[in-house]
Image (spheres, rainbow, N blue to C red):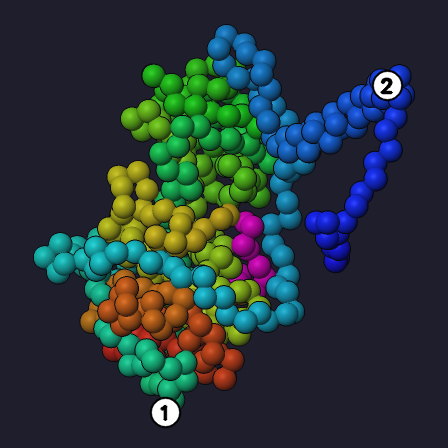
Amino acid sequence: MHLRFLPSNFPLKIPQLPAWWQVRYGLVGAGLGLPILGVVVLLPLWRAQPALTPPLYLSQNYLSPDTLGSVAAPTPLKNSPQHVPTPFLGKSTPTGSSSLFFPSQDLLSARPTPALTPQTPATIVNPPVANKTTSFAPVTPPKALNPVPPSQSRSPEVRVAVVDKQGQVRIGVSANVQITDDRGQALGTLAANQAVTLQAGGQGLTGWEKPLPTSIWLTPGGQGLVYVDGYWYRGKMRIINLNGTITAINQLELEQYLVAVVGAEVYPSWPVHTLKAQAIAARSYALAQMFRPASRYFDLGNTERWQVYRGIKDEWNTTQAAVQNTRGIVLTHSGRVMVSMYAATDDIVRDVFGGRGMSQTGAYELGKQGYSYLQILGNYYPGASLSQIQ
């Protein structure tokens, strides 16, 4: 749209109206203008109201539950989009500090085979410097790791902090769920699709129909899901009042967790072998964190500091297949679980991790050129081996 301005010396003749006409037009203008102004001002405010605004009704100083409404449990698994996007350099995970490279004197002792459970200590080792961190495609094909079959063993459970040290948290469930304490004692039933805003009270949690203890559990059955601050999650959810702030911890099977992590870390339409390499790297990283947890309450967080995790939002049929086809397979070095660092680009891997780890865009390029996940992992984790979680 073009705007044309009049020259400063252009003569403008504005007719002068009689005083009584000015009064009449002023009253008419006010009568028409005020309603229009009210609509213009109030309509955006009305539209800006969030769908899940808690009611102002108070009962014995506790917020009454309110309906989730449009935030109902979605269909968990989606088909992967056909379009293959150009690698987005913003996906860089995990981008932790050098403290993730555990000093050898602090390593836990044991081997990843023949038996690994979350309670079994495992030795953790840093990955060697990758053979190639300056180009997506090696001049010569990388040495492939020896394949191992997917594990048939039961998946261990991982504890992921999906909310950490907040003043309040909004929770809900897709089906009726009993709220229990740490001893498993039932405290009441949270109805399906009812949102409750929990707050950290002096002696526990407030915001429900009655006071709750410091720590509670939501354990859906079957395909039930738990809603926490905008996302739906599988598995159990623990809500804790820690020193006056709320932490929400999702506890679920490692393999199910990885389906969502792979979908959050890379595009689900990327090459199959790139997704497999990402699944193994993410599994190895998570397992290392399980043996060296971030807190007594959880193993790792859900942000780029660890691995991005947003529940079923990022579950795809392609990421599910990549996880299933590599089930229980982890990277090891000299019989020890490898802290398999990875980031978006070669530059980040070099600058943040000293060249130790996988470039996700590099893995994309190698997968697009036909390299297998064994070759991709062999390129970025030289000297590594593949082992099973038994």
As drawn, the residue found furthest toward the left would be 105
Dot 2 corresponds to which residue?
Answer: 19
Front residue of 351 and 109 = 351
| Rendered location of residue 71, percent (x, y) | 63, 37
Residue 153: name its quadrant.
bottom left
Q: Main secondary structure of the magenta part?
A: helix
Q: Is residue 325 left or right of residue 183?
A: right
Front residue of 356 and 237 = 356
Q: Amino acid at mark 1?
A: Thr
**In the figure, 259 relative to 219: above or below?**
below
Q: Is residue 389 left or right of residue 336?
A: right
**Is residue 127 visible in this depiction of the protein?**
no
| Rendered location of residue 282, percent (x, y) | 38, 61
Dot 1 corresponds to which residue?
Answer: 140
Residue segment shown in magenta: 312-320
Going from N to C along the chain, the mark reached first, 1 or 2, is: 2
Q: Mark 2: which secondary structure?
A: helix
Q: Mark 1: which secondary structure?
A: loop
Residue 137: name its quadrant.
bottom left
Location of the C terminus by quadrant is bottom left
Q: How many marks?
A: 2
**In the figure, 300 relative to 19: above or below?**
below
At x 32%, y 78%, the residue is 133
Location of the N terminus by quadrant is bottom right
Front residue of 58 and 191 = 58
Q: Amino acid at mark 2?
A: Ala
Q: Is residue 116 left or right of residue 9?
A: left
At x 41%, y 36%, the residue is 248
At x 60%, y 36%, the residue is 174
**In the figure, 231 relative to 185: above or below?**
below
Label 1 close to label 2 by CB (< 8 Å)? no
Let me know if residue 315 is in the magenta part.
yes
